[in-house]
Image (cartoon, rainbow, N blue to C red):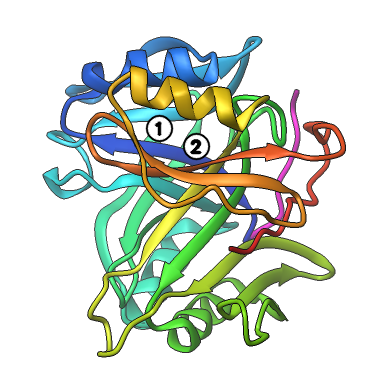
Amino acid sequence: MSRSFRPGEAVWVELCTPDPAKVENFYRALLGWTVRTERLGSTTYRMCSVDGRDVAGISDATGLHGGRPRGWIVYFAVDDIARSATQAVALGGELVTPPRYLPAAGTGAAVIDPFGATFGLYQGEARAGVQMLNSVGALCWNELDTGEPAASVAYYRSLFGYTTRQRGDGPTTRPYTLLMLADVPVAGVLALDNDWPNLIPSKWITYFAVASLDEALAQVSSLGGTPTVGPADSPYGRLHLVKDPAGHTLCLIQLEGGLRPGHDSSYPAVNR
């Protein structure tokens, strides 16, 4: 599937880990990925696909993104990556990977926001981004978990021009903010319990769809990963946070009402 993305949409996800081979088999078995390798400078980039459609990447932290394991990184589409990278820094972020042209793809950069969350900027050319959404093994949502929700929302609004909508701010749930492009939610911001400012570093969480959450959780354990927080119900299905064998956090969700087709850009907004 070939599609275009609007500036501000989440277009790609990449796992930055110090030992890609250690986690490759985990994701192959858990999410049904086929993995092929591509050269990226002096490192090897693992391109992950489902039914021949690219859904994610796995990079070697020893050669990218400041040499540190950043975990799952969400990339947002931009029209002018040099300008966006400059703005991201001017707003208080740190540029850890300057804009770099990726052959047969586009230009990417990585930034740490003012509260510790790593994210990417991507100006697509030959490769627009993920080729499948909301199907088993594919991306279906991105969420920023942060102890500084108001300031974090302000940062991303200034950078990408989002509007916002509040959800889950009643007495029994934690505040949840949807980041919107027009009337389409593109990501969520979950307020973490945080008694002191920035005590808990912010983190972007990538959600992948699974056919059966219970079966997926059993696989996580048998493959050397760890179920952590959950299960929890959401308006879009049961979900559970897990860690892969290298300790990187992701979220698995069993979408209800049938899986949404990949060309549908209306991502599911979840809350827990």
Name the side, left or right, on which 115 lies relative to 61: right
- Please name the predominant secondary structure of the magenta segment in the image: loop
- Residue 48, position in %: x, y? 48, 19
Residue ID at (73%, 39%):
255
**Quadrant (top left, top right, bottom left, bottom right) of the C terminus:** bottom right
Please rate how many residues cluster around mark 2, counting C-alpha atoms within 10 Å: few if below 14, some from 14 to 19, many from 20.
some
Say above or below: 184 vs 36.
below
Residue ID at (53%, 21%):
31
44 part of magenta stretch: no
Please rate how many residues cluster around mark 1, counting C-alpha atoms within 10 Å: few if below 14, some from 14 to 19, many from 20.
some
2 part of magenta stretch: yes
Element assignment for label 2: strand
Looking at numbered disc 1 in the image, what kind of residue is underneath it? Leu
- Residue 133, position in %: x, y? 70, 35
Name the side, left or right, on which 145 lies relative to 261: left
* Real-space Cα separation, disc 2 to disc 1, in angstroms: 5 Å
Looking at numbered disc 2 in the image, what kind of residue is underneath it? Gly
- Residue 59, position in %: x, y? 29, 30
Name the side, left or right, on which 117 lies relative to 235: left
Element assignment for label 1: strand
- The residue range painted magenta reads 1-7
State whether residue 89 appears in this view: yes
Name the side, left or right, on which 141 lies relative to 149: right
Q: Are marks 2 and 1 in contact (CB under 8 Å)?
A: yes
State whether residue 122 appears in this view: no
- Rendered image quadrant of residue 95: bottom left
Q: Which residue is mark 1?
A: 102
Q: Which residue is mark 2?
A: 106
